Amino acid sequence: MRDMLGEMPVHRGEEGLKKDKLMPTVTIDGQKVEVERDATVLDAAKKAGVWIPTLCYHPAVSTSGSCRICMVELDRGDWRQLITACNYPVRRDIVVYVSSERAERARRSVMELLLARAPESPELKALAERMGVKSTPYPTVTESQRSCILCGLCVAVCEEIIGRAAIGYAGRGVDRTVAAPFRQPSEDCIGCGACAAICPVGTIKVRVHEDQQEVEISPFKSRAKLTVCRQCGEPIGSALVSERVLAKVQVSSEEFSELMRLCPKCRRSKTAAQLESADTDRRKVDVKAAKEQMSLKK
Amino acid sequence: MSTIASKRLNCAADLERIREQLLSLRVASAKSVHICTGPGCAAKGSPRLYELFCEAVKEAGVDVEVQAKAVGCHGLCECGPIVLIQPSDIFYQRVEEPDVAEIFRETVLGDRVIERLLYENPTTGEKAKSADEIPFYKAQKRVALACNGVVDPTKITDYIAEGGYGALAKVLSVMTPEEVISEVEVAGLRGRGGGGFPTARKWRSCREAEGSPRYVICNGDEGDPGAFMDRAIMEGNPHSVLEGMLIGAYAIGSSQGYIYVRNEYPLSVECLKQAISQAREIGLLGQNILGNSFSFDIRINRGGGAFVCGESTALMASLEGRTGEPRAKYVHTIESGLWGKPTNLNNVETWANVPAIINNGGEWFANIGTERSKGTKVFSLVGKVENTGLVEVPMGITLRRIVDEIGGGIRGDKLFKAVQTGGPSGGCIPAEHLDARVDFDELTKLGSMMGSGGMIVMDEDTCMVNVAKYFTDFLQKESCGKCTPCREGLSQMLHILSRISRGEGEVGDVEELGTLAEILEGTALCALGKTAANPVLSTIRYFRDEYDAHILDRRCPAKECRGLFRYEIDAEACKACGICLKNCPADAITGEKKVPHVINQEKCTLCGTCWEKCPFTAVKKV
């Protein structure tokens, strides 16, 4: 495979870094916003209140720019280049077009390709609708595992936030899938469900097997021991997660540990009961003082 | 010889002294037999020839000054194995094991030429005694391959004797890094890996980039189907690559280099490893090279077998031990490459050109070629030409000269159809553009590209829809699958192309392919995806009629797509031998003795067995 340097930014080279500004201005469809150096075009668009669809982007994890749904046009003077808004760093004053015909067509085309891959996903359909894509002209030619669009957020969150890297990619090209090693249930999975929470198309689900007292992260088949509320017996989630949270916050108070063993509902009612029995007068004063402080600040 | 170069070289004068010693040891009357062990000749058994020649030398005893030498690729792989007898410069081709004794007796010892082993010009019938007389070599100009076929790649002394590392000595003793970059700038050297980016500009940007350490990388992940230019250099003259990298590292200010070699090239790895250890031994790699404060070392990394790892960011990811997948290049690798540090990557051939530029001067290099493409380019010329092999031509030469003069024209009495350049991301150039010049910009204008130098010649029997399908299939399989347009778009394109070649194409398919091509070009993440549609676009551009024939007439004009042509028996040519009838697995052929046979089209499964078996070529594709 040969290498191409076509994308080498034009402001590099002879003119060098001197032009880079601390607070460059991004002009989005005619609207000007200032952002910090190295903020992305997407950051700028958010600041300007311009919506750009995203799938593989999440502020919590590093950007991969893999889904290509956030394409916008960058004005390069004598020509315009399609770029991904989520990872294009702003280093000087630039002009971008989100609603230009070419940018919109690019985004819609990517969506059509994704819809062909995952026609069943309600989440994807909803985003398509918001983008004005009603259907796809393409047949389904690649196999997806339960509507997975391979955005990679689950893999990123597991590695970067949870620190487990229990899932990764298997296969290449059209055979690429997200899986635990050897497609077997992973021992590294703590059953936290972060992958399910971050999945933009609902591919990953957390299943509770009450009969076996286990949580399962589907479709990876990884299982973890289920913990239940000490008070009402309702399932809370993975026992490993509770253990880790307790270890991480390092609060030795027995009271806190006790709270953590309850389901959110019971936790709330217990906290409420505790507050009830506390000195109500002082609380009132406190609230009043806080409110006063707030108004002073304003 | 090895004892001469076993001591560490402490200054440029040391190198010069060794060179003189090596040359003085060469007896003027001594003969040497150069056996090509390049990829093509090696596949035809040349390593065994080398052994036999070595034995013959041993048997001849000490009285005879003869040396057998295994050298790199000579280029004319079609006629391999190639053996050269020096100093009389006799060029033997298609040498086989039984010829060794005769060559040794007659030519080496007896100074007689063996006519039978000489190259014969297929058109004039003239025999060529030396390489210069062979048309294949006449139009070529060797810069990057200058020492290929001359030096033994396993011996650093051989390279030094030919002036090797002289450019490095020059750079270290009299040139500043900026002067080196200026020299390369004057030369107008552009990246030989495919993009054609000005090398000096890349070096300068890297030199000026903030951060340290800086890295230099040699991209030896040559993966284009049919291409073996870089391999021939790495295996034929590995020291030229090392010297180029050393000079580049000095110019950029780097002390660590990497050579990334594809896993399918174990011999290249072996050759480079040996070259590196020899260079280290005499202090041409390591600390304080030639007494200068400049220090540099090189590591070899083997690829894992992915085509996409030739893309710079994927290569660097792979080098770091991560999955070889490209990333966005909005922040370029010059600024943040390997481990987030400024990194300069050039391809094998680019590096190999550097010593020649320093030795002969940038102006000398710039005098070769066209206005915007300087120097020479190595191509691996393959496909339906008479002389396949490795060729190095000055930029600006026409495609016609490469195909007709160097390649010897189309094999057999077939007609030329197209030449595919630029690898899987390149395009097919038809006959009407054969007078186009080999130049980065000109080839791009024609919808193809220079690429890394693959050149596949096709004749009238090649179906262009099938060619487009082949390359799309290749790229779809080699796509890393990271970005949507490449993974999904190429699959959609392949789906349409497969339908067309099965005869199930629909009106509008070509337009649909055009739309998908536009999506890929605009939205794919890396160069693999962005250029992946080129084979399809260029074949549509020049051979639209073939697409239409497939779609509208359900007919393959080149008679390559199964089902889109029929087999028929030419009654006049048929000798009624019955071979087709006996071999037909579908019992679709009827006939008797002395009666021409006939294919029952309803029963025929189009397997082509009759066509293959007929000794009288009476079975025709219609």
Image: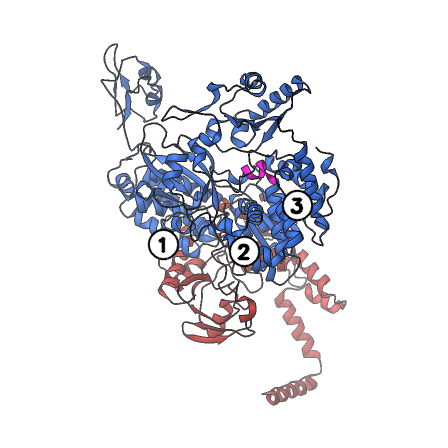
Chain colours: A red, B blue
Magenta segment boundaries in residue numbering: B231-238
The image's mark for residue B299 is 3
Residue beneath the point at 32% across and 30% down: B414
Instruction: Using the image, determine if residue B576 lies above or below residue B420.
Output: above
Nearer the observer, disc 3 or disc 2?
Answer: 2
* Image position, residue B281 (x, y; %): 72, 41
Q: Is residue B416 magenta?
A: no
In which quarter of the view is residue B384 placed?
top left
Q: The numbered mark 3 sits on a residue in which chain? A: B
Which of A263 and A8 lies nearest the eye of the viewer? A8
Q: Amino acid at mark 2?
A: Ala
Q: Residue A124 at x, y = what percent?
A: 44, 58
Residue B235 among those drawn in magenta: yes
Judge depth for marks 1 and 2 and give the one in front: 2
Where residue A143 appears, as percent x and y from the top left, is 45, 46
| Residue underneath mark 2 | B200
Tag 1–tag 2 contact (CB < 8 Å)? no
B576 vs A129, nearest the viewer: B576
Q: Chain of mark 2?
A: B
Q: Secondary structure at mark 2?
A: helix
Left or right: where does residue A167 sit relative to residue A73? right
Q: Are marks 3 and 2 on the same chain?
A: yes
Secondary element type, mark 3: strand
The part of the image, by quadrant, that contains residue A27 is bottom left
In the rendered image, which residue does mark 1 sit on?
A: A136
- Report the residue at 51% width, 37% height from top: B228
Q: Quick one: SS at disc 1?
A: loop
Left or right, residue A116 beside residue B21? left
Please tell me whether mark 1 or mark 3 is closer to you in this view: 3
Q: Residues within 10 Å of mark 3 (few under 14, many from 20)?
A: few
Q: Name the quadrant of the C terminus of chain B.
A: top left
